[in-house]
Amino acid sequence: MKIRWKLLFIVFLGALLLNVTLFVIARNELLPVMTHLEVERIEAQLELGYADLYQPIETLANIAEDYAAWDETYAFIEAPSEAYIRSNIVKSTFVNFGLSFFVFINQQGEVVHDVYYVSGSESLRPVSEGLLQELLQESRLWTFADADQLAQGFYQLDDKIYGLVSHPIVSSNGEGPSRGALIVGLVLDEDEFVRIGEDWGHDIDIKLLQSDFHLDAVGPDASIHPYDVRVKDNETLVSRIHVRDIFGRPLMDVVSHFKRDFFTHGKIILETMLRWNLIICLAFAVICYLVVDKAFRSREKRIESDEQYRKLSDEFETILDGIPNPLTLISPDLNVLWVNKAGSELLADVAPAESGKYISRVEFISGFAEGVSAVERCLLSKKTERYEAELPDGRVLEEYAYPIKDADDGILSIIRLVVDVTEATYLKREANQNSRLASIGELAAGVAHEINNPTGMLLLNLDLMSDVFSDFIPVLDGYHANNPDFEPGRIPYATLRKKMPYLLKEMTDAGLRIKRIVEDLKGFVRAEEATKVEAVDVNEVADAAQRLVGYQLRKATGNFTFSRGEGLPPVRGHFRRLEQVVVNLLVNATQALDDRSGGICLSTRLSEDGRWVLIEVQDQGKGVDPAIIDKITDPFFTTRRNDGGTGLGLSLSSRIAEEHSGSIRIYSKVGQGSLVSLQLPCYTEKS
């Protein structure tokens, strides 16, 4: 035994020293050097890339200086002439120099002449009003303190990036006073950035930024454009050139990715060294084991001991494998010591980075760094801990960690149990949601009742006022005959006599509309009896639903249409529950639109075979990804969870349709919109 322990100690010490040496070399010597060399190489390329990025601006500056310091231009700004334009500002000027526009501005901030050229067009055109207004508002572009001042750089308007150079217009000898400014610009399109990327030998990505700078806080000479190189991961370095616009505001980041060739080669060297080291250690350990085993352990005793251990282990694993929940035994250094069958299936989807390392789906959600998993908290508290995690696939798991302690209250190992509580969690959420909806319904019913009382009073009084005004007309006519200047309320009597009946009728109609909406709202939130099944007119259902969501429809779109099918047979069911389905479909359609230009169409019709009545809602929104279209009717599935979506609307609607022996069918195309069809069987006396 003494020799065996000494031999094992020597092997352990040698392996430990070797691994420590490799770690020190990798961390402190080889890998940092490789990274430093990569960064220096990329920084040299960024210097060239930065010059390429500003090459168009330098070209513009030379052109602007030639034109602005020209005596003919100096005379033109005071006395514009067609001869100057015909001879100098022509199409070939734009084509040869790759320009987009010229703008001449005098000292008073007035545009003397402007011209714009679109690549490939046959003629020149004026500069757009939007661009002119932007240039004129930025007085620093055309107001200069001296003749040598110059403004140049990038400028963003809407979704376009311009290269701009503004030069004071002076005489050819460079003397003032300045008579204005010449602004020369070009549009930097995607092809220009692609060309720059090709010159670099890498794909580049242009990311426009939202500037929080105020123009008064920075000057036009703010031309610092720093760049940096960062390590993204072991495979990639990311470089960024931070570009500011002509006023010093952050404009865009030019991003490029570089493979870490030096770093990768360094890792290969280290891995090769480590591999050979492990092989040598393993071979040495095998030899030592054979020698020690031959000297101190007989073959028969070893076989008997192994058999007894195997038998006990099999019995123990059989019992624990019968537990349907994942059960894992974990060491204090987070190595998996044992796992049952259910736990093996849970871990099978995620291959560990190191064999035996504690890695599971729950870890990927919580993470060791955050320290929120049950196992990590159990190591700290030395008490039973619980953690709940919702996975990307919708499952909800509860993780329990139970510590196994020694006599000194130290943790020997941890038992980890994972329980799938998805169904119970969803049922609890649905119950809470239904409770909140019921409370909202009671509140809405109370508000509707309070609105209904004054509305009834208004309608009653308006009817009385109409009768009173009719009776007063003869008296007022007589008074007006004797007093031609009679103007009640500063309105000529003839105008008032003609319009008053229409005004009273409009107020009455408005009151009736309020009353109808209140009645629809009260009916919508009123609980129907389960046995109240009747013949339902789908057109009335659609009418009531679109009145309830009228505000949302008007806010979401300016193109809502309702196509009512004529002569449709009734369906058998609950009016308010069907109304709830149509309300859900209309609300979903409003949420699918990007802006008010998109349209929504509500329609009712009979199917081609005459067996079904269809209520259809079609929108011109974003559409649904085919990968998730089969899941959108599942309970609690939603793509709007960050915006307050619960995932209950379509699920509840689908269930109501099935209760009415019908169905909901969804047809969608990404980028073109969706069509949702509620199909209900026709109801006849025979059926």
Image (cartoon, rainbow, N blue to C red):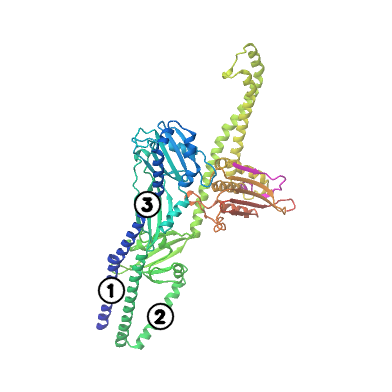
Q: Nearer the viewer, residue 237 or 521?
A: 237
Label 3 crowd (10 A; few <14 / some 14-19 / many >=20): few
Say left or right for 52 vs 511.
left
| Amino acid on which disc 1 is placed | Leu
Q: Examine the rendered structure and indicate whether residue 301 appears above or below residue 316.
A: below
Q: Secondary structure at mark 1?
A: helix
Q: Which residue, given by chain and number where applicable, does mark 1 sit on?
A: 18
Say left or right for 29 vs 258.
left
The magenta stretch is: 559-578
x then y, percent, for residue 463: 63, 27
Q: Which residue, given by chain and number where applicable, does mark 2 sit on?
A: 310
Q: Examine the rendered structure and indicate whether residue 143 appears above or below residue 250.
A: above
Say left or right for 623 vs 112.
right
Give the distance between the C-alpha atoms of the residues marked 1 and 2, in whole angstroms: 35 Å
x then y, percent, for residue 374: 38, 62
Residue extending farthest top:
482
Q: Which residue, given by chain and number where applicable, does mark 3 sit on?
A: 51
| Amino acid on which disc 2 is placed | Arg
